[in-house]
Amino acid sequence: MMRTEPYFMKNKEWYYHDPKEWKYKLTDKAPPKARKSYEEFYSVQYDPLFWGKTQEQIDATLRAEKKRLLEGE
């Protein structure tokens, strides 16, 4: 599956890279559409672990992980 550049990265004034957390952060100049794009970028669907998976596969994996955590394994 090919990924495209997230909308929030369309303008370098909207974001910067935080080397301490090793992630992108938004600036105050980021508009609402860029903020939404940022949230989507860091959502589970953008996690490489889930690339190429269907939503059903993602949901099943998350349910299994939640069950594992609740059971204390």
Image (cartoon, helix red, strand yellow):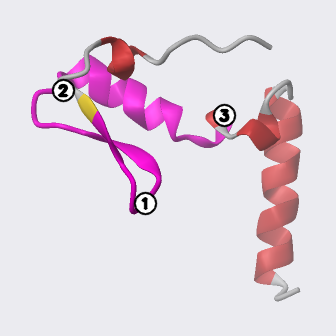
Name which quarter of the figure residue 24 lies in: top left
The answer for how far apart the CA atoms under marks 2 and 3 are is 22 Å
Mark 2 sits on what residue? 30
Q: Nearer the viewer, residue 44 or 28?
A: 28
Q: Residues within 10 Å of mark 1 (few under 14, many from 20)?
A: few
User: Residue 11 vs residue 51: left or right?
Assistant: left
Spot occupied by residue 8 in the image (x, y as percentages of width and height): 34, 21
Asked if 68 appears above or below 39 in the picture, the reply is: below
Rate crowding at label 2 as few (under 14), some (14 to 19) or many (20 or more) other CA atoms within 10 Å: some
Does dot 2 land on a helix, a strand or a loop?
Answer: loop
Picture quarter with the C terminus: bottom right
Residue count near mark 3 (Cα–Cα under 10 Å), binned few <14, some 14–19, many ≥20: some
Determine whether, in the image, residue 48 is placed left or right of residue 3.
right
**Dot 1 lies on which element?**
loop
Sequence order check, earlier mark of 2 and 3 = 2
Q: Quadrant of residue 48?
A: top right
Residue 18 or residue 46, whichever sits in front: 18
Check contact, mark 2 vs mark 1: CB within 8 A: no
Mark pair 1, 3: CA separation: 20 Å
Rendered location of residue 47, percent (x, y): 68, 40
Q: Residue furthest left?
A: 28
Disc number at residue 21?
Answer: 1
Q: Amino acid at mark 2?
A: Ala
Real-space Cα distance between discs 2 and 1?
A: 19 Å
Mark 3 = which residue? 45
| Number of the front mark, 2 or 3 | 2
Classify the position of the N terminus by image quarter.
top right
Q: Residue at x 28, y 18 (%)?
A: 33
Q: What residue range appears in magenta?
A: 16-45
